Amino acid sequence: MILDGIGDRACRALEGKTPLEAAKTPNLDWFASKGKVDYCYPVREGYVPESDAGVVSLLGYDIGNVYRGSLEALGLGIKLRNGDLAFRCNFATVDGLGKEEGNVLDRRAGRTLTTHEARVLARAINSEVKLPFKFEFYPSVQHRGVLVIRGGFSNNISNVDAKDGKIVFSNALDDEEEGGKLSTELVNNFVRQSYEVLNKHPINLRRARKGLFAANVLLCRGAGNEVPRFKKLKGKWMSSADMPLEIGIARAVGMEIYRSKHPKFRGIDVYANLYAALKKNIKYSVRMLRRYSKKYDYFYVHFKATDLPGHDNKPLDKTRMIEMIDERFFGFLRKFIGERRLVVTGDHSTPCSLKAHSDEPVPVLSFNCANVKAGERRFTEREGLKGRRWVGRKLLEGTLFKK
Ligand code: ZN
Ligand code: ZN
């Protein structure tokens, strides 16, 4: 079970506690008291993981060939060939993109773009942007999307992303002969042309009138040019995750995919929508666990919501989400678990005060994986540090798979 970005630091709004410490979690406490609490560097010490590297590593793999763009494409069910260049894209907001570098006002268009709006914008991009190679832009969930350029390209290039509030374009990272330059020209050209299409699009004009961030630029990152392939995980696995990245990873390691549909985005209250999505996801995961507990050996559950309040510096919301998961998910699991094993951790820390991922370890709770003495314990960063030290790649081997 992965709680995305769960690790945190002491928060002033929580009287010096972390969200895990501040949250009332009777059910997680029950598991912790009867299980073991350790800590884990999802990838390795000193490394700040994105979700892709964090999850892949926790599942026991080397992150050498992990490319977010290709994994996201796989998660959307897009057929890739080796050489196709795939990016994870964000609809974002810039104040212009002329000769001067644009200021990035929001990396996710205020997180208020609806999936429907994104689909309409994507249609305009696909019909109006012209590149010398075949390409497709796929919207996924809200501000997220994937760009695929078909052909045989180098992916040894940097991201189109925000840096110090300005947009930076892609640069080749390899020698001239290796083709990185062509890839950067293509993606940069795509970003400039799509800005022209997006910026004057009626959807964005309407958003501006409502005081919402325009979705007028596409940031493109995590370039991949290979079909992701990993050795299959041992045992029969199923996954319940609702974001394309986690679905792509689950698919790449041979899991069967189950996913709940995203609830329709209602109104513009971002957090009301996040809570609704989390609730739905919890309910769905519980239902799948019940239904398929005999069919599969292992079940991978990923809740994405807990990462977002870290990025937004909202420790109270992070705490509330943890409480919601404790009540609705771990409350069920407590009755369901029996002799089954459970490992709970995060793919990285996302401290509220940092508003970004950090290299700090995440706590790990393992239950029924070893003989331990019952005692007062909680699943928190501080308690974790009193336990054993893990690195992501070794974690399942040493807990879930341990004989
Ligand atoms: Zn993550
Ligand atoms: Zn994050």
Image: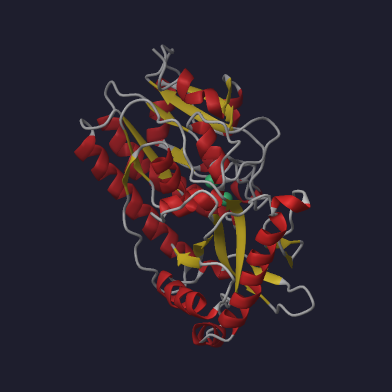
Residue at image position (44%, 20%) is: 399
Give the image location of residue 29, x and y in percent: 43, 30
**Most foreground residue, 316 or 349:** 349
Give the image location of residue 103, x and y in percent: 73, 72
Relative side of 375 to 294, left or right: right
**Most foreground residue, 155 or 394:** 155
Please tell me in which quadrant of the rendered image residue 298 appears: top left
**Most foreground residue, 395 or 167:** 167
Give the image location of residue 20, x and y in percent: 52, 39
Residue at image position (45%, 43%) is: 249
Quadrant position of the C terminus in the picture:
top left
Q: Is residue 315 visible?
A: no
Relative side of 54 to 276, left or right: right
Q: Is residue 56 visible?
A: yes
Residue found farthest to the right: 100
Picture layout, residue 347 above or below residue 320? above
Total numbered badges shown on the rendered structure = 0
Please tell me in which quadrant of the rendered image residue 172 appears: bottom right
Quadrant position of the N terminus in the picture:
top left
Task: Tell me which colouring the rendered structure shows.
Answer: secondary structure
Relative side of 116 to 188, left or right: left
Give the image location of residue 151, x and y in percent: 54, 58
Picture layout, residue 307 above or below residue 385? below
